[in-house]
Amino acid sequence: MIKSYLTESPAKTKELGKTLAKNILKKKKGKKAAVFGLEGDLGGGKTTFLQGFALGLSIKDKILSPTFVIMKKYEIPKSKEYKNFYHFDCYRAKDEKEISVLGVEKIISNPGNIVAIEWAEKIKDILPKNSFWIKFKFVGQKTRKIIF
Ligand code: ADP
Ligand code: MG
């Protein structure tokens, strides 16, 4: 089922991310990592959304746009099911190989991981079929469309 939201501020986008993360923690985990592919416009709010998502996972570190770092790992406190949150940003990645060498296959096969990938469309072929996709569209100065 497709759900689409219009957010009118960064705070509202963060709120959506936070709600999603809290729901993930409540669900029973699968046999592999929970993988979220974020795609869409530059400035569409992917990183902003993940800042709220991390808050929902009770992660205290500030999530930054990893301009030079492609991957960052955070510990998830308080959850028995999930141990680590991985944030990938494939914006600068040339191809799947560049991401592959970071050990992404191993990371996404570990059921204790939650993995969020910005510009995931670039590495679609190495992501699990059951990944959860979220699309971001730049609508206006303060408005973004977020489609689940
Ligand atoms: P992306 O990671 O998709 O490139 P970012 O989250 O880094 O996007 O940037 C989004 C930018 O747009 C931020 O500067 C943010 O403050 C601004 N912004 C304005 N309105 C919104 C909104 N409704 N949702 C998310 N970000 C917004
Ligand atoms: Mg970003």
Image (tube, helix red, strand yellow):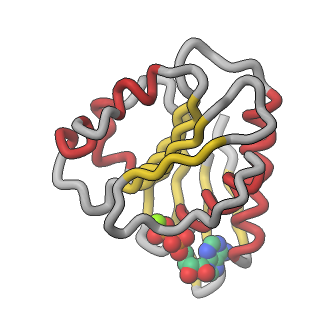
Given residues 87 and 120, the one toward you in this image is 87
Residue 138 in view = no
Ligand 1, by image quadrant, is bottom right
Task: Return the residue found at the far bottom.
Answer: 141
The quadrant of the picture occupied by the C terminus is top right
Pick out the residue farthest to the top: 31
Who's the residue at 43% across and 67% down the image? 41
Q: Quadrant of the N terminus?
A: top right
Left/right of residue 87 with respect to residue 96 in the rendered view: right
Q: Position of residue 93 (x, y in %)?
A: 23, 55
Picture residue at 32% right of the left edge, 61% below the top: 91
Relative image position of residue 89 (x, y in whole percent): 39, 56
Q: Position of residue 79 (x, y in %)?
A: 77, 32
Is 135 situated above or below 2?
A: below
Residue at 72% in and 24% down: 81
Q: Is residue 121 left or right of residue 77?
A: left
Asked if 140 appears above or below 132 in the picture, the reply is: below
